[in-house]
Image: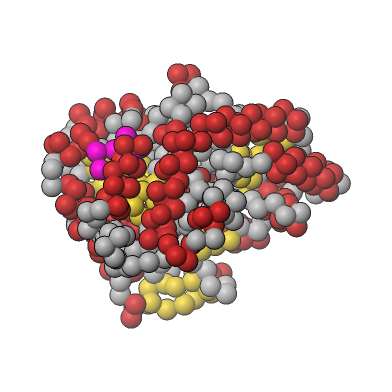
Amino acid sequence: MPGHRSGLSWPESIRSGLASLDTTELAATDDLHQPTGPARAAMELAARCFGAGKTWFLTNGATGGILTLLAGLVGRGRKVILPRTCHVAVSHAIALLDIQPVWLEFPRSVLPDPLGFLPVVSVPMVFEAIQLHPDSAAVFLTSPDYYGRCADLTAISHVVHQAGLLLLVDEAHGTHFAVAPGLFPGTALASGADACVQSAHKTLPALTQGGYLHLAEALLVRNPLAADRITTALKIFQTSSPSFAIAASLDFARAYLETEGLEQVEKTLAAIQDLATTLWPEYLVSPAAANPVRGEFRDPLRIVIRSRDPVARPATELARQLSGQGIDIELADLTRLVLIPSLDQPSEDFERLRQALRSCRATSQNDNSGEPVMLQKLEQSWLELLVQPPERVLVPGDVLLRPETVTPVPLADSEGAVMAQALAPYPPGIPLLLPGERMDRPRLDLLIALRNNGINLSGVDQDSIRVVV
Ligand SMILES: Cc1ncc(COP(=O)(O)O)c(C=O)c1O
């Protein structure tokens, strides 16, 4: 990320013309908050490309889009059904909007998939939550996740709509799905979602912070006021000076997807397939094809790599070694690397990755410390604690938005304390504790062990965390 490869995916006119694109609201440029001219035309082209009834350009990332979506379509104080594995932006929306979260219940025996750490939400889980909480306003899901794994949104949307709820999707990692319906899982909109947000900068040649917010045509027919509510909410959560440079890059990214996207996707999938074949049996690499008919809902463009060495070192260490060889890893959890190729990633880059992984393999095989058994146990307890809610003591908004009640304490001494902010291993930025929740011994032990294995913790500042006095 970002998907423009330091501007190499752009034509020279954009690469060298960024300063001239950084303009303000003029007759020739339009107003991104109230578009009537070229910006409106660009958003309409995006709506057509992504199969939306209406599209907005986001210049504060999917983060701003998630806040806008929940404020505009759900509003204050309502119940929303969602998994605990959402991005931290969702927990901020919960606090700001006093949303009552109804956490989806994952099966107790949830096991990490070799190529995707996060569990995927199933239809029965959603069905059960709706039965228990029919007064909810919406179901909010992330699909695909950081590892490219997707929920069966078509089946879920039937269940959600039968109950009269909205289906809202964080599709931050799936902006490129629209280009090739046969090669990727269906987009959120094509699968029946009412609305979604996308982080264009993650997988398309758009500037960082560039994203799209889409409303489905069917939602606009049922509720014509929905568009007005999004426009109003966007003015709250997005700067009053939205960047025209970002907006122009979003327009370019859409045009690129439509004209060159499919060809580039096919080339990149072939390169991933080749990588997977040639790195086997030392490494397991995510398959470059997925068959939704067989229930394989994953993004074949997302590269997930896992060493098959039973005594491999933590993936965070492998990531550091690769970074020393000029290869940027998007995410390393305990046992997997996640890489996001740009659509036009040159074949030499795949070759460099292959060579670098081979040279790192030798290093890990020399060290039979027995650590990985512990890593797998740690991963299992991370997953279990991620999906089980801890004790909630205070309402998130009462904590996050009352700074006078907050004090720092050393992380090691925080057992029993009530969190004043989210604590999230980062990336992927999925909180283990939300504001208002109590730190318990298993979570504290886990956080310390994760840090000892090279995982960054968002919310920990020089060994201390913010708790409620
Ligand atoms: C699932 C998910 N949703 C939302 C976001 C926020 O996206 P942005 O960086 O565009 O604000 C991220 C960022 O990593 C993410 O992984």
Tell me the quarter of the image containing the C terminus.
Answer: bottom left
In the image, taking residue 305 as reference, residue 282 lies left or right, namely: right
Residue 51 magenta-highlighted: yes
Magenta segment main secondary structure: loop
Q: Position of residue 155 (x, y in %)?
A: 33, 26
Q: Position of residue 173 (x, y in %)?
A: 46, 44
**Residue at the spot x=29%, y=38% of the render?**
52
Q: Nearer the viewer, residue 337 or 218?
A: 218
Image height check: is 173 above or below 409? above
Which of the 4 quarters of the picture holds residue 352? top right
In the image, taking residue 121 as reference, residue 227 lies left or right, namely: left
Residue 459 visible somewhere in the drawing: yes
**Residue at the spot x=53%, y=73% of the render?**
461
Q: Position of residue 369 (x, y in %)?
A: 80, 49
Considering every residue shown, the one lying at the far bottom of the view is 404
**Residue at the spot x=27%, y=59% of the render?**
30
Magenta stretch, residue numbers: 50-54
In the image, taking residue 222 as reference, residue 53 lies left or right, namely: right
Q: How is the image coloured?
A: secondary structure
Residue 378 visible somewhere in the drawing: no
Residue 206 magenta-highlighted: no
In the image, taking residue 139 as reference, residue 113 lies left or right, namely: right
Q: Position of residue 210 (x, y in %)?
A: 42, 54
Q: Nearer the viewer, residue 358 or 95?
A: 358
Image mark count? 0
**Residue at the spot x=62%, y=42% of the render?**
345
